């Protein structure tokens, strides 16, 4: 008799294939968790430090597995991400046959349409025509994802700057469309839905891959590989013990597991908005969760004050977590009341003259309250929409956003308390 968590015959067949490719599975198995899909489960008691999975290089799908004759067809600057996706889309059937059982275990496009904001309809991911309060259309995605607000009008940034956790959806769309342009410049008849599906497969299931001694690329999308069986691991805010020596990835247990426990790994210390955009889920408890006050702060500071921040390399990425505001945010707050001379000396670490923690905290609290106001307004809109919406295609997405916004409101409330201490 099969256990309650048995994922199905196809996953058994895939496991056999993975083992035939040299993957070593020790005390773990793919499992189906009610309401959450697939993951990895312990099939016996596992001790901390025990090797639970080994994936050899020969079993992985890397650039080395793509025939050179295929790679040469594309522009030299095409990303590894884009090339892996197009290989899965239009690669030679004989080359792809090896991965057929593996691919049958992957999510469907419908799964992605349900979970990934990139594929959500405009009525959910963008301005929402269903919401009618006599005002303008509502934006339902968090600002870190959409770059848009309902309660304030953004100012144009005085300077460009890099940010890995803001304007997430636009950045993802740019990566996808750049990849697509590289592909259709060579194969104009490639099917968009099939290619974008495979692009999302690579995006959500790949591991960071660099050979020992290899210089990290500027773009993380050029350091990707797909690892059979390892892609069953779900993400959690946990410690990791994963090592790659150039020949194999070795996964070790970071604590004791009883038989029947789900085993997680960490995809990195990412806020929930990043997880939702890049992977289609977020955590109920996430020690790395954060919001960013950039748009609120830039609206509150004149162009000349923003120039000061830029000159001292404190322009942008003003992070707030449950423990309070980051140092960059404190520096920006000081600029509102300190003289320019005192502020420059403070920013450079020469002097604390003129710095008043109480004044800084009051300013930061005002900024956090502005974010909380955005949360309150959007929560009200989503609650109203959830009462009216009956289409199952939308109710799940609305519920996902409502829970996320309530998390954000809770983060704001906790941060306000932390800043007041």
Image (cartoon, rainbow, N blue to C red):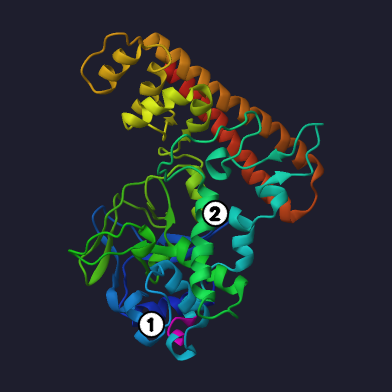
Q: Is residue 371 above or below residue 356?
A: below
**Comparing labels 2 and 1, the label whose residue is closer to the camera:** 1
Label 1 element class: loop
> In the rendered image, which residue does mark 1 sit on?
72
Residue 92 x/y as whole percent = 47, 88
Residue drawn 61% across and 76% down? 191
Inspect this view and state whether residue 149 appears. yes
Residue drawn 37% across and 81% down? 66
User: 274 and 97: which one is in front?
Assistant: 274
Residue 221 x/y as whole percent = 39, 61
Which range is magenta? 96-100
> In the rendered image, which residue does mark 2 sit on?
280
Magenta portion: prevailing SS class = helix
Task: State if disc 1 and disc 2 touch (CB < 8 Å).
Answer: no
Q: Is residue 78 above or below residue 90?
A: above
Q: Viewed as shown, does residue 332 lie left or right of 211?
A: right
Label 2 element class: loop
Q: Residue 129's mark? A: none
User: 98 and 178: which one is in front?
Assistant: 178
Residue 391 x/y as whole percent = 78, 53
Residue drawn 58% across and 44% down? 146
Q: Viewed as shown, does residue 333 lie left or right of 186?
A: left
Q: Residues within 10 Å of mark 1 (few under 14, many from 20)?
A: few
Mark 2 or mark 1, earlier in chain:
1
């Amino acid at each position: 008799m099969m256990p309650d968590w048995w994922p199905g015959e196809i996953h058994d067949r895939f496991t056999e294939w993975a083992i035939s490719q040299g993957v070593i599975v020790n005390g773990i198995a793919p499992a189906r968790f009610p309401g959450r899909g697939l993951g990895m489960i312990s099939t016996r008691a596992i001790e901390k430090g025990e090797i639970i999975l080994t994936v050899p290089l020969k079993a992985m799908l890397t650039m080395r597995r793509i025939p050179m004759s295929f790679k040469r067809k594309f522009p030299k600057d095409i990303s590894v991400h884009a090339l892996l996706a197009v290989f899965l889309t239009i690669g030679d059937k004989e080359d792809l046959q090896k991965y057929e059982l593996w691919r049958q275990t992957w999510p469907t496009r419908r799964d992605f349409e349900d979970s990934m904001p990139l594929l959500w309809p405009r009525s959910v991911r963008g301005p929402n025509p269903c919401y009618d309060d006599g005002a303008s259309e509502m934006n339902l995605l968090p600002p870190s994802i959409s770059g848009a607000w309902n309660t304030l009008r953004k100012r144009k940034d005085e300077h460009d700057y890099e940010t890995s956790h803001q304007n997430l959806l636009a950045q993802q769309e740019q990566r996808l469309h750049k990849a697509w342009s590289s592909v259709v410049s060579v194969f104009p008849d490639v099917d968009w839905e099939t290619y974008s599906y495979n692009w999302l497969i690579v995006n959500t299931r790949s591991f960071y891959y660099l050979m020992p001694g290899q210089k990290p690329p500027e773009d993380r999308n050029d350091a990707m590989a797909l690892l059979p069986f390892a892609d069953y691991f779900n993400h959690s805010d946990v410690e990791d013990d994963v090592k790659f020596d150039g020949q194999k990835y070795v996964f070790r247990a970071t604590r004791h597991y009883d038989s029947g426990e789900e085993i997680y790994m960490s995809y990195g210390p990412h806020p929930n908005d990043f997880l939702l955009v890049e992977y289609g889920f977020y955590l109920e408890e996430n020690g790395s969760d954060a919001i960013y006050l950039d748009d609120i702060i830039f609206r509150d500071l004149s162009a000349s004050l923003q120039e000061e921040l830029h000159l001292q390399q404190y322009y942008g990425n003003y992070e707030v977590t449950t423990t309070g505001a980051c140092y960059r945010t404190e520096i920006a707050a000081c600029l509102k009341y300190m003289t320019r001379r005192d502020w420059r000396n403070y920013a450079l670490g020469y002097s604390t003259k003129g710095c008043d923690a109480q004044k800084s905290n009051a300013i930061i609290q005002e900024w956090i309250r502005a974010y909380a106001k955005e949360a309150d307004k959007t929560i009200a809109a989503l609650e109203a929409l959830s009462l009216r919406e009956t289409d199952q295609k939308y109710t799940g997405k609305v519920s996902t956003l409502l829970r996320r916004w309530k998390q954000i409101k809770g983060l704001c409330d906790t941060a306000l308390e932390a800043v007041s201490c």
